[in-house]
Amino acid sequence: MKKLLQVSLLATAVMAGLSGCNEKQEETAAPAAVELNSFEDKSAYAIGLSMGRYIGSTLEKQQELGVDLNNDIIMQGVKDGFGSDGQMTDEEVQQALMAYDTHINELIEKKTEEEAAATLKKGEDFLKENAQRDGVQVTESGLQYEVLTQGEGDKPAAEDVVTVHYTGTLIDGTQFDSSVERGEPASFPLNQVIPGWTEGVQLMPVGAKYKFYIPSALAYGEAGAGTIPGNAVLIFEVELLEIEKAADAEEAVAAKSEEEATQQ
């Protein structure tokens, strides 16, 4: 079992190394090439190279947090790990690694908080300036919007299912989602999305196209979501294509359930 565990951990390190290879490596003097003629030599080199790249990539990211480890000491630890002359006991190694993980997590948390605070400030400044532009309207909640194209159809209620085309960006122009690029509109109950959407789309008649500027408190807040950072203001261009009233949607679901039950 112990050997199987060791092999599993090694395989994990190898796969992580292959997926985390750092394409931008510092230019250094090339070491003497080794002969890779046999299966064993190729396997050994692949393991070493992938592990080295994984460690290097990981340490490079942690250098951004202010942690700069001595590569020579790392290499000495690797060499000692192949023998029995390690300068630390297993218990000391475990304690050192746990302390290292704790320190890294603290630095990550601090950096995340600092970035979230900076994002919040930038968002507040952006919304304050944006609210002064001609055509931008501000609701009581702080949601900002402008009418790009006005429609003439019905307006949805929060309980209705809407079909829309949309493109979402951050205030710096970074696009994080777009049904337009996917070439397929999205449909969902309006009361099951972020508050800024629920409020804003209810202002739109069918056929309209609006641009929403959504404060973080009406979006994903401090937590963020996926590639969306915490405290981010979101900008959406939304075109309302269709409304399915809540009662009609419930009847459609019930009819589909009944049909599936009959087929079974």
Image (cartoon, grey):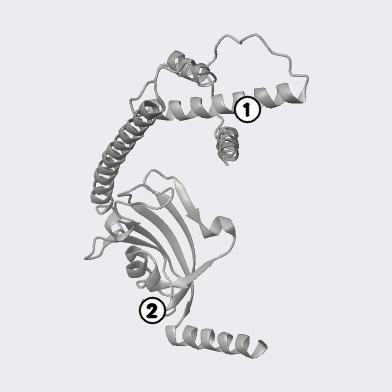
- Quadrant housing residue 119: top left
Residue at the spot 30% in from the left edge and 60% down from the top edge: 218
- Quadrant housing residue 202: bottom left
Q: Is residue 220 above or below residue 30?
A: below
Which of the two discs, 1 and 2, labels the residue nearer the N terminus?
1
Position of 91 with respect to 38 (left or right) is left
Of tags 1 and 2, which is closer to the observer? Answer: 1
- Residue, disc 2: 159
Q: Is residue 163 above or below residue 111?
A: below
- Quadrant housing residue 237: bottom left
Q: Evaluate whether residue 23 shows in this view.
A: no
Position of 254 with respect to 171 (left or right) is right
Quarter of the rendering occupied by the C terminus: bottom right
**Disc 2 secondary structure class:** loop
- Residues at discs 1 and 2 in contact (Cβ within 8 Å): no
Q: Evaluate whether residue 130 shows in this view.
A: yes
Q: Is residue 214 above or below residue 164?
A: above
**Disc 1 secondary structure class:** helix
- Residue, disc 1: 47
Cα gap from disc 1 to disc 2, whole angstroms: 56 Å
Q: Nearer the viewer, residue 41 or 211?
A: 41
